[in-house]
Image: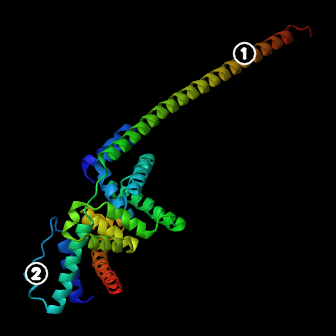
Amino acid sequence: MSKHYVDLMETLNMHADQPTSGVIDEAEYSQMPPEQRQDLLSLLKLAERTREALTPVGPSPDYRQRLAHDLTKMAERRTSDGIRITLRSQRTEWLRGAAIGSAVAVLGGAAYLIRTYGRARSQRASQAPT
Amino acid sequence: MDERERLLIERAQTDPAAFAALYDRYVDRIYNYIYHRTGNRSDAEDLTARAFLKAFASLERYTFRGVPFSAWLYRIAHNLVANWHRDRTRRQVVSLDALVLRSEDEQRPEDVTQTREEVRILRDTIRQLPTQRQRLLILKFSEGLTNREIGQIMGRTEGAIKSLYHRTLLGLRSDLQRKERKN
């Protein structure tokens, strides 16, 4: 990269990064060779024209408000959906707990019956005549 | 990313209603970016709405990895504009001339320093630049971002943005000169 290229790039960037612009001090570049100076000034002027052509544009207040309203509605819907999901999941947990509880009760009952049946059978066996 | 912004994002991620604060903070900038990329208000409004709806829908997945939230939003906006350009080219519903005329109708008082025709030609030429160059000019001049911030949005280094800016101005100048010669 030539020194001229780097100098030009740096100067253009420095100029573009100035918060307020519109003024190009041509005397500032008077030490430059005429051809390079002309090249730089033409690019600086083009940068200024571009800045003007791209002046910020804002949305209309009506539009801004309408979109904010739509997003708020959506947020409300999402919040209420979130609550429904929570409720649904709580109900699922409750049902799962009830199912486990029922299974434990059934298994407990079955274990009790097996134990009782086993005892009765061993008692009958011991009382039987030899 | 500043502390206030980080808190706003965290709040909005757990409380959807808090997204309004992020919207207020960025809607003007995103609208401005899209407006200059599309050249007309109706498409800018449509795409801005889509950008925020998309951001709202995917905010839960946003995590800070060195790229500021604003850069994330600009990328969403950029992708929507890119799709819009692609669809528009495919459908050919609106001609470029119509687009230029529409933007001309929306002439703003700031334009008085340049003649209407000069501004029209310059905007038209900017919109015909490669996408990355258009993005750079809009982010630099219309959004007032630094090279570092632009680099974060465009996924390039600060040095690369500096160089791209130089090449963009050279390209824009030669495009304008070519148009002048034609006329």
Q: Quadrant of residue B106?
A: bottom left
Using the rendered image, report if marks 2 and 1 lie on a common chain.
yes
Residue that appears at 57% across and 24% down? A94
| Image mark 1: chain | A
Q: Which mark is residue A112?
A: 1
Q: Which mark is residue B84?
A: none
| Nearer-N-terminus badge (2/1) | 2
What's the amino acid at mark 2? Glu
Left or right of B54? Residue A25 is left
Left or right of A30? Residue A103 is right
Q: Nearer the viewer, residue B121 or A81?
A: B121
Q: Nearer the viewer, residue A57 or A74?
A: A57
Residue designated by label 2? A26
Residue that appears at 86% across and 12% down? A125
What's the amino acid at mark 1? Tyr
Left or right of A27? Residue B86 is right
| Image mark 2: chain | A
Element type where label 2 sits in the image = helix
Q: Is residue B54 above or below residue A111?
A: below
